[in-house]
Amino acid sequence: MREIKAEEITKVIKEMCIEANCVLNDDIKNAIKNGYNSEKNEIAKSVLGDIIKNADIAKETMAPICQDTGMAVIFIEIGQDVHITGMGLKDAVNEGVRQGYESGYLRKSVVKDPIRRGNTGDNTPAIIHTSIVDGENIKITIAPKGFGSENMSAIKMCKPSEGEKGVMDFVVETVKKGGGNPCPPLVVGVGIGGTFEKAALLAKTALLRDINESNPDEYYANMETELLDRINKLDIGPQGFGGVTTALGVNIETFPTHIAGMPVAVNISCHVTRHLSRTI
């Protein structure tokens, strides 16, 4: 049994909050550069150029890539041979978020109550997803999620009879409805199967996958390619100014489901699709 101090988790999450908000992932940045090189719409090309310049400045100065530093969404894989000492895991995580957002001068966007509002002042509580895995390590993935794109996400309890076409049409229609609001170019996470809440979680975790990595199932890999092509023909383009770079990638994750259902969730993410992982 390996012991890991809770304060070590706090320290790592503090650092990750800052880095994830200031340094754009290479897969996203390279895809934006590819879009810049292939974009024919001059306004769209100019916007992509500005996005690249902004990402470079953010990394150089360790300033946030976007003013919306989001809610801290954190996935924690805990080895079954790990014992956490000190404070509880939830408290350790939230303390890390609190310290990271304060010392990194990141915007605090979390309100105490969904209807009555009132800012918590430190961007806590975080959204925490935990799972037990083999081994004696803890893997932490942080994915700060801004709400310009989160607000454009959707879920549909499709009927099994709607099949592949129904799923794909829903994904494309969700992106189309969002238009320029979620700050394209986008990464589109799609979750298919499970139950209502499982589909949403699948869509969220789909955003963590490198956009250069296709679904290992060839059927869904082909669906990802076709969806990306259809979305980029919508002429929404970077920031909604038109062009062929509406999305940088489409990632699909699936799970077995009930004979009577086919849940489909679409989690939209802007060009600042932030995710960072570390193992303790």
Image: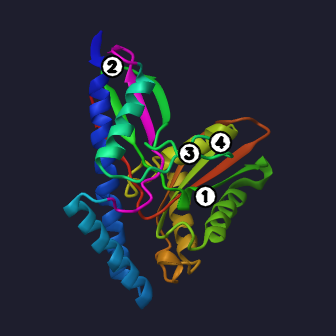
The answer to whether the residue labelled 3 contacts the one labelled 2, judged by CB atoms less than 8 Å apart, is no
Mark 2: amino acid: Gly
For the question of whether residue 42 can be seen, the reply is yes
Mark 4: amino acid: Gly
Region of the chain picked out in magenta, as a range: 64-87
Horizontal side of 2 relative to 76 (left or right) equals left
- Nearer the observer, disc 3 or disc 2? 3
Crowding around mark 3 (Cα neighbors within 10 Å: few <14, some 14 to 19, many 20+) is some
Q: Name the residue under label 2.
A: 135
Crowding around mark 2 (Cα neighbors within 10 Å: few <14, some 14 to 19, many 20+) is some
Q: How is the image coloured?
A: rainbow
The alpha-carbon separation of the residues under discs 2 and 1 comes to 37 Å
Choose the circle earlier in sequence order: 4 or 2: 2
Q: Name the residue under label 1.
A: 151
The alpha-carbon separation of the residues under discs 3 and 2 comes to 36 Å
Q: Name the residue under label 3.
A: 111
Label of residue 193 in the image:
4
Quadrant of the image occupied by residue 179: bottom right
